Amino acid sequence: MSIRSSQLPENSLLVKYRKIAGAYTDCYTTDVSTSVSHAQYVNAFYTTSVFKLERFILKWTVSKPSTDDDAKRLADGISDAFAAWKVEARTENQLLLSDFINRTKSWLMIVPLISGGTRLYFGSAVVPAKTTGTGKSSLGVIVRPLLGFHKIYSVALLYATKRRLVRQGI
């Protein structure tokens, strides 16, 4: 179950953050051999055991609880909020979420493959904030060291999502 670091597609809803000086963006992809709808992908992503750990942490650290039903409503386009995020933009095959302080972005996209499978994309952005002392934009002394962990976590999230979709026979 290969997960690859990839270039962010130019048609991505996340691409605008790549153009912000000092911002961090990433993109990971994996292919599944079956046809997966965007709603199926979003729902599977936010209901994996890996992401449920993040949901648990958000519930207790910033009072932003969420359930599997909340994830399904987000995936189905019924809700524009989920845990610590709100929908910033949505298309038929993409979803861009922004956290409640507007510093981090999560992006999910699907692209059908000619072979009949589906390419799953997952990306993130961290937007720099102006420092109080200098007024310059920076990711900050806490965020920058966490990027290594973030990359590993991103791969784990996409891997868990792919496994979930394959196990469900989707």
Image (cartoon, rainbow, N blue to C red):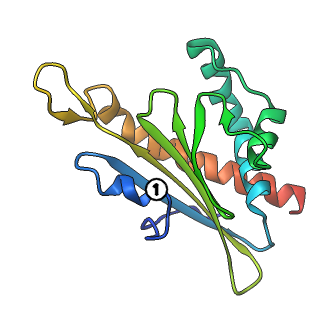
Which percent across, then down, holds residue 61? 56, 13
* Residue extending furthest toward the left: 134
Farthest right residue in view: 169
Mark 1: give few (<14), some (14-19) or many (20+) Cα within 10 Å: many
Q: Quadrant of residue 169?
A: bottom right
Q: Residue extending furthest bottom?
A: 114
Point out residue 60 in the picture as x, y percentages from the top left corner: 63, 12
Q: Is residue 113 above or below residue 147?
A: below
Q: Quadrant of the C terminus?
A: bottom right
Residue 134 image position (x, y, % from top left): 10, 25
Which amino acid type corresponds to the residue marked 1 in the rendered image? Answer: Leu
Residue at the image point whose x is 88% and y is 56% from the top? 168
Name the quarter where the N terminus is drawn.
bottom right
| Depth check, front residue: 86 or 65 | 86
152 versus 142 height, above or below: below
The residue positioned 32% from the left and 25% from the top of the image is 142
Give the left or right position of residue 95, taking residue 161 as reference: left
Q: How many marks?
A: 1
Disc 1 on helix, strand or loop? Answer: loop
- For image coordinates 52% across by 59% down, the residue present is 28
Nearer to the camera, 45 or 98: 98
Q: Quadrant of residue 35?
A: bottom right
Q: Which residue is mark 1?
A: 14
Find residue 7 and report its horizontal and vertical position in percent: 42, 67
Q: Is residue 138 left or right of residue 96?
A: left
Where residue 118 sits, quadrant-wise, is: bottom right
82 relative to 97, above or below = above
Which residue is nearer to you in this view: 19 or 50?
19
